[in-house]
């Protein structure tokens, strides 16, 4: 008996988890040598417009100049909407010009801030798709559109700021929520060449530097600090618990209370990518430079007249060069734990101001009470001190993993 068989095709649908679901954004980081700013590149909107944005650990979200921005997927965030509330929208904005991205009515106003102009900008919140070169898309990313005249002070070729503070609308938080990734990011600011910003995980797992990383808690200053001060709201900046400073192995004799965060939010140590150099209160700066000059002199390094904004400068010809930069006394930021410190070698502590002179790249931040608008911070670790150091911000466990100088291991941010 003949029987007919139907060929049965099994269509096996395999959901391959592509880079989409599992990987975060890998973004390049470059240094602008004129301004010393570090910036990244993203693609935005249906036209995949390239936006170069300066990296700012203290800023709330992404913002850029939209005067020339065109995208069919751009959607303004309306006033009083849930998305406006999540973004802490603080006003309702309108616009008289022709309708375009950045010029819409009934638009939720964000709080974009220019660290280089020192004031808040006007900017409406919107959503659009972000694309990265490693083929990850972030749909409906919230950002602010500002006017092009707001871009004063930004490195040439850049049109905005990429904010990475501890807010609901910072890039890493939005990526974590939308792509279902842990709220983590890694930052490696290059001294030259191409560094990396990895959003959605740690970079170290992709290279062999993970065993070099030292862990310290990220602490939350209970008082709002920085430009957008909100009464009763904790700081969105990243603080670590530096307890003392050692120069050439010797602790500075500075009262430990100078390092701690007070009830009023003053003091403590935070990390900034938009300060060129580490800035410290005078009460720490003076003993620091004194100890450094003394230890340098013991190494037969010759002091020369200071060049502003620095106060301790040296004749380059009296300093030898090592794999970790100029051979000078090591500065250590001492952290909690058994002999845990962030070591700052010559490549991060000496800034060449001319062919013959290099200076201790730390700046006097004045006395602690001078600024009354918002609480000031004892130590602001600046970008020059972060270069060629890998930093992983883990906001799930509230920890910072850091490498100190990668040069010690004959690596650099451009070679990770
Ligand atoms: C950082 O340094 C550059 C180059 O010296 C200078 O042009 C710029 O004004 C400095 N920026 C700040 C915020 O001090
Ligand atoms: C915007 O586009 C116009 C016309 O192409 C150009 O002249 C102007 O410089 C652009 N502005 C910015 C900020 O790129
Ligand atoms: C960008 O997209 C718009 C549609 O939103 C289109 O009209 C325009 O021609 C595109 N511009 C460029 C430069 O591709
Ligand atoms: C916003 O509303 C005003 C008043 O109705 C109108 O004149 C203006 O053209 C609108 N702006 C845009 C960009 O549509």
Image (cartoon, helix red, strand yellow):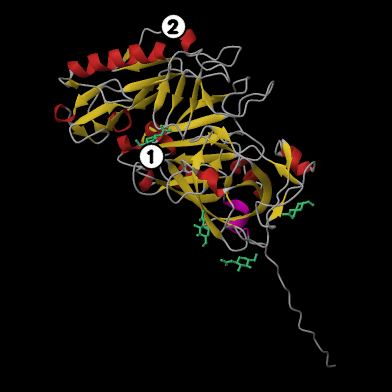
Q: Say which residue appears at 50% left-offset and 35% top-offset.
A: 117
Q: Are marks 2 and 1 in contact (CB under 8 Å)?
A: no
Residue 42, image x, y percentages: 53, 53
Mark 2 or mark 1: whose residue is earlier in sequence: 1
Q: Is residue 148 left or right of residue 39?
A: right
Q: Is mark 2 within 8 Å of ligand 1?
A: no
Residue at mark 1? 36
Q: Is residue 75 left or right of residue 392?
A: right
Q: Is mark 1 within 8 Å of ligand 1?
A: yes
The quadrant the N terminus occupies is bottom right
Residues in magenta, as a range: 17-23
| Structural crowding at the residue carrying mark 2, measured as other residues with C-alpha within 10 Å and reported as few (<14), some (14–19) or many (≥20) | few
Residue 373, image x, y percentages: 58, 20
The part of the image, by quadrant, that contains residue 338 is top left
Query: Vertically, is 379 above or below 414?
Result: above
C-alpha span from label 2 to label 1:
33 Å
Q: Is residue 295 left or right of residue 403?
A: left
The part of the image, by quadrant, that contains residue 316 is top left
Residue 276, image x, y percentages: 40, 32
Residue at mark 2? 255
Q: Secondary structure at mark 2?
A: loop
Q: Secondary structure at mark 1?
A: loop
Furthest-right residue in this view: 1
Of the pair 368 and 140, the residue shown nearer to us: 368
């Amino acid at each position: 008996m003949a029987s007919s068989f139907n060929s049965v095709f099994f269509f096996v649908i395999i959901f391959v988890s592509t880079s989409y679901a599992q990987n975060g954004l890998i973004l390049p980081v470059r240094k602008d040598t004129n301004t010393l700013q570090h910036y990244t590149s993203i693609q935005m909107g249906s036209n995949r417009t390239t936006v170069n944005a300066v990296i700012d650990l203290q800023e709330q979200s992404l913002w850029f100049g939209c005067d020339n921005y065109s995208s069919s997927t751009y959607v303004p965030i309306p006033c009083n909407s849930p998305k406006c509330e999540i973004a802490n929208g603080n006003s309702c904005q309108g616009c008289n010009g022709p309708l375009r991205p950045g010029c819409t009515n009934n638009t939720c106003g964000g709080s974009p801030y220019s660290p280089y102009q020192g004031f808040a900008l006007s900017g409406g919140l919107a959503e659009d798709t972000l694309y990265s070169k490693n083929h990850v898309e972030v749909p409906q990313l919230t950002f602010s559109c500002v006017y092009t005249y707001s871009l004063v002070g930004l490195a040439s070729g850049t049109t905005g700021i990429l904010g990475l503070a501890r807010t609901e609308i910072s890039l890493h938080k939005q990526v974590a929520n939308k792509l279902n990734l842990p709220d983590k990011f890694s930052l490696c600011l290059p001294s030259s060449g191409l560094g990396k910003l990895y959003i959605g995980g740690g970079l170290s797992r992709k290279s062999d530097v993970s065993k070099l990383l030292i862990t310290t808690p990220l602490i939350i200053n209970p008082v709002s600090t920085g430009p957008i001060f909100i009464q009763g709201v904790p700081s969105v900046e990243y603080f670590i618990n530096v307890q003392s400073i050692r120069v050439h192995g010797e602790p500075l004799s500075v009262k430990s209370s100078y390092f701690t965060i007070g009830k009023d939010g003053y003091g403590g140590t935070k990390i900034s990518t938009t300060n060129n150099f580490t800035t410290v209160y005078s009460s720490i700066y003076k003993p620091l430079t004194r100890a450094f000059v003394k230890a340098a002199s013991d190494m037969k390094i010759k002091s020369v007249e200071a060049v502003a904004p620095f106060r301790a400068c040296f004749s380059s010809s009296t300093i030898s060069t090592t794999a970790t930069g100029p051979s000078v006394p090591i500065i250590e930021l001492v952290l909690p734990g058994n002999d845990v410190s962030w070591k700052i070698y010559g490549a991060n502590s000496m800034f060449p101001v001319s062919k013959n002179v290099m200076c201790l790249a730390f700046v006097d931040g004045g006395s602690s009470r001078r600024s009354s608008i918002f609480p000031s911070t004892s130590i602001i670790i600046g970008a020059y001190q972060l270069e060629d150091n890998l930093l992983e911000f883990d906001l799930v466990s509230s920890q910072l993993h850091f490498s100190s100088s990668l040069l010690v291991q004959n690596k650099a941010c451009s070679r990770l």
